[in-house]
Image (spheres, grey):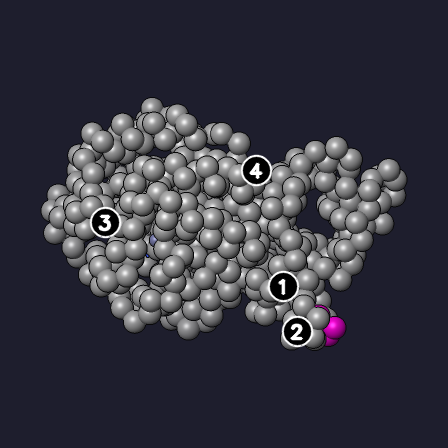
Amino acid sequence: MTRRLYRATVFATPRNPFREARALEAFADGALLVNDGQVQACGEFSAIANANPNAEIHDWRGSFLLPGFVDTHVHFPQVRIIGALGEPLLDWLKHSALPEEARMADASYARLIAREFLSALARHGTTTALVFGAHFVPAMEAFFEEAGSSGLRIASGLVLSDRNLLPVLHTSPDAAYEQSQTLISRHHAKGLLTYAVTPRFALSNSDAMLDVCRSIMAETPSLLFQTHLNENQQEVMAVAREFPWASDYLAVYEKFGLVGERSVLAHNVHASNSELQRLAASGATVAHCPVSNASLGSGLFAMTRHVHAGVRIALGTDVGAGTGFDMLKEGLQAYLMQRLCPDGYGLTPAHLLYLATRAGAEALGANAGDFAPGRSADFVRIQAPEGSVLQAVQKNAESPERMLAAIFTLGGAESILSTWVAGRQV
Ligand code: GUN
Ligand code: ZN
């Protein structure tokens, strides 16, 4: 494969801005050198071009190159219920989400939805996603097949539940074990696919089902784990009733060994200090979904307490409670909500980029999310549409940081020109 040199304004956050100053790398006349699907170099165009005279130059001046977005919490069966506004979590599940999830019993419908879902990810510049799957094996077979041919980096798994949902969405712990192992043997670590053990949430799972999750994780340590945690006050109270032995919500998952470095727990809006300390010690990541938290009225995310406790945080759109696939919008919403929170965290453009890219890649153990040499060449080309407000701001932006802020504020699917995974356009 020839080495390709992409010339554009380049942004990345190879360092964690929650821990280090100057985390943002920005090259106004920058270059990304890609060889055999990997980043070979990133920096000033002149330096990289001089050092690599044989590279094929793609002159994308006027565009912006960012690491591909990493959506750490998104539900594939919920594409067609985006926009069901007006209800809190448990009512929204009952009236909107679960009836649509039941339709995934029809595998050809599930395949159609999978295609809509994967194409929406790519069109929004998302290159990697940790995806909540469906409750049905044929739907998951269809999803993994479509994900494999999409070229995207996808982690997902069969959703497990044995109580408190619609009966058609329930399975038994024994069936869950057998079906999960079959899906793992067929799809885990194949190409860019990873399997994620996915109990829907504590409220819909018995001790026996969570114990099955423990067994599956123990047998294949390279799996990921995902679920929901502390999203809504009614949910938290219901979990306390279902698990009277548990000191808090997190303790339910801890008892079954499900909280570790490969765990991604969505929301955590209503967390105690003890839970934050234990999450930090475990190395688990909280998927922060600020649009969904606002839309369902779940609550204000205590980012400052998470950061001070040392809990890892990444971003998720939580489609379909979230209102769309746009990780730029998700970053902007994180910023806006923190502005309104008492004790809110002062997020800078570097934080937004890190949360939308490298933080998620770290959570999923993906060799992506920034432009360090050797990373997979996962990137997004952003260009302000002709006549757009973003283009007007671009003419005036006085610093790269201001421009990055404008991209998060005004960017969207219409400004995503192309999306690349491992050096290939998807
Ligand atoms: N908790 C259990 N299931 C769901 C879901 O589908 N969406 C959200 N936001 N929370 C959940
Ligand atoms: Zn969710």
Of badges 2 and 3, the one in the foreground is 2
Element under label 4? loop
Position of residue 380 measured from the top left corner of the image (x, y, whole percent): 63, 52
* Residue for badge 1: 415
Mark 3 or mark 4: which comes first in sequence?
A: 3
| Rendered image: mark on residue 388 | 2
* Residue for badge 4: 367
Give the residues drawn in magenta, as a range.
393-397
Mark 1: which amino acid?
Answer: Ser
Question: Is 175 displayed left or right of 284 in the figure?
Answer: left
Residue 59 shows in the view: yes
Q: Per the image, is 283 magenta? A: no
Distance of mark 3 from mark 4, alpha carbons? 31 Å
Residue visible at 80% across and 53% down in the picture = 59
Mark 2: which amino acid?
Answer: Ser
Position of residue 166 measured from the top left corner of the image (x, y, whole percent): 19, 51
Mark 3: which amino acid?
Answer: Tyr
In terms of depth relative to the viewer, which is nearer, 97 or 288? 97
